[in-house]
């Protein structure tokens, strides 16, 4: 009997020791779960990363952001959580950059036209008919001159990591088919912003105004503006065709994005964590770049099926007319952006 009692005491003592150890463990992980960014055992920092953007889900930007999330969460074993906010849910055009600087968000992916106030180089996607396709635009931004322009954001504590293309912009409006430059006379067009886009519409005798993307559908619906320019995937995913009777296939300017982070966040990552996040960026870049053209083609098909907007493809001669009209604007802005930079950009078409 005494032997049984002794065994029972040993068993109880062991149980007590194990439960105390387990409690200690769970107390530690509770503490680290609460922390915004804390080192865990294998060197990966526990944290939540926010990615914010202004467009819909069925777009290259969102698909790229989701690929980043998937990679980073998987490779960090769930230690890093990535929250993706589309449709200006977290921040819109007017406030996303300052919130990136303040590290309230760790990645944003603005259309470069929204960055022209930071540096004139970001007007490049708005240079009329400059790049022949996504590949040429991508090659420029991956190259020396493109990287130089990205570097200029470092003064704000912002790092330009990669360019993500969306594609050529087409012109939509609710007044009339656009076939020649004179057709734009008197129309009021919404732009993404910047003096170059403004100069283009001035040259075409049209008015222009910059409106945040999140407010664009309503502005078109209420007639605040007659038209806008965008990629098929943006037009279709945001249903602009419901309020725009005419689409002119022109490809005169482009939507290209800059994937941006801030130095406060980036420099706070240890090597192990940075490697995972960097590879997530590469993965997202691959998906965004690979999906842009196809998503635009799919959207064009959907727009045709829906039949709300009359799609008018300009002939080569008609496009040449627009090119000729906009040539002085191109020349003036080559000087403003830098002739060496534009020469380098043009060379990517070969
Ligand atoms: C727009 O404002 O029209 C676009 O730049 C939105 C986007 O991010 O693609």
Image (cartoon, grey):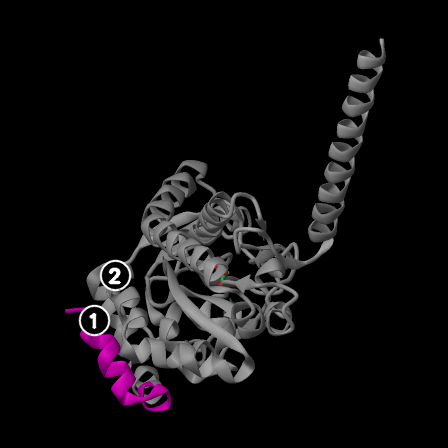
Query: In the rendering, at what x and y percent does residue 23 appear?
Result: 77, 39
Is residue 133 in view? no
Which of 308 and 72 lies nearest the eye of the viewer?
72
Residue hosting label 1 = 348
Which structural element holds mark 2? helix
Which residue is rendered at x = 48% and y = 50% of the image?
72
In percent of the image, x 83 and y 22: which residue is there?
Answer: 9
At a point 64% along the width and 58% down the height, the residue shown is 38
Q: Residue furthest front?
A: 2
Above or below, 211 relative to 81: below
Kindly give the residue lying farthest to the left in the view shown.
Answer: 350
Q: Locate the N terminus and report the quarter of the image it occupies.
A: top right
Instruction: Specify whether 189 is left or right of 255.
Output: right
Residue receiving disc 2: 135
Front position in the image: 28 or 326 = 28
Residue reaching furthest to the top: 1
Camera-side residue: 204 or 239?
239
The quarter holding residue 330 reads bottom left
Q: Quadrant of residue 124?
A: bottom left
Which quadrant would the C terminus be assigned to in this image? bottom left
Label 2 environment density (alpha carbons within 10 Å; few <14, some 14–19, many ≥20): some
Residue 224, x across and y down, in percent: 62, 64
Please indicate whether residue 323 sits to the left or right of residue 212 in the image.
left
The stretch in magenta equals 334-350
């Amino acid at each position: 009997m005494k032997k049984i009692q002794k065994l029972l005491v040993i068993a109880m003592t062991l149980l007590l020791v194990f439960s105390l150890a387990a409690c200690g463990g769970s107390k530690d992980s509770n503490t680290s779960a609460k922390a915004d960014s804390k080192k865990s055992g294998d060197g990966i920092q526990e944290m939540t990363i926010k990615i914010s953007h202004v467009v819909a889900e069925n777009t290259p930007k969102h698909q790229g952001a989701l690929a980043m999330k998937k990679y980073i969460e998987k490779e960090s074993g769930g230690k890093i959580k990535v929250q993706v906010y589309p449709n200006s849910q977290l921040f819109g055009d007017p406030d996303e950059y300052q919130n990136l600087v303040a590290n309230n968000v760790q990645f944003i992916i603005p259309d470069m036209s929204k960055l022209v106030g930071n540096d004139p180089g970001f007007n490049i996607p708005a240079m009329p008919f400059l790049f022949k396709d996504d590949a040429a635009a991508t090659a420029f931004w991956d190259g020396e001159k493109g990287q130089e322009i990205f570097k200029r954001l470092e003064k704000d504590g912002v790092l330009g990591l990669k360019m993500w293309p969306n594609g050529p912009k087409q012109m939509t409006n609710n007044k009339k088919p656009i076939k020649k430059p004179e057709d734009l006379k008197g129309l009021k067009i919404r732009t993404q912003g910047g003096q170059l886009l403004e100069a283009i519409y001035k040259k075409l005798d049209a008015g222009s105004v910059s409106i945040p993307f999140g407010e664009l559908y309503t502005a078109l619906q209420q007639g605040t503006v007659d038209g806008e320019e965008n990629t098929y995937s943006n037009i279709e995913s945001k249903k602009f065709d419901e309020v725009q009777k005419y689409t002119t296939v022109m490809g005169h300017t482009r939507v290209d994005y800059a994937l941006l982070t801030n130095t406060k966040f980036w420099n706070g990552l240890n090597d192990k964590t940075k490697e995972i996040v960097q590879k997530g960026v590469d993965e997202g870049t691959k998906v965004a770049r690979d999906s842009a053209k196809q998503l635009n083609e799919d959207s064009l098909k959907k727009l045709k099926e829906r039949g709300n907007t009359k799609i008018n493809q300009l002939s080569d001669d008609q496009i040449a007319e627009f090119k000729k009209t906009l040539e002085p604007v191109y020349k003036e802005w080559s000087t403003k952006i830098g002739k060496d930079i534009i020469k380098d950009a043009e060379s990517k078409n070969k």
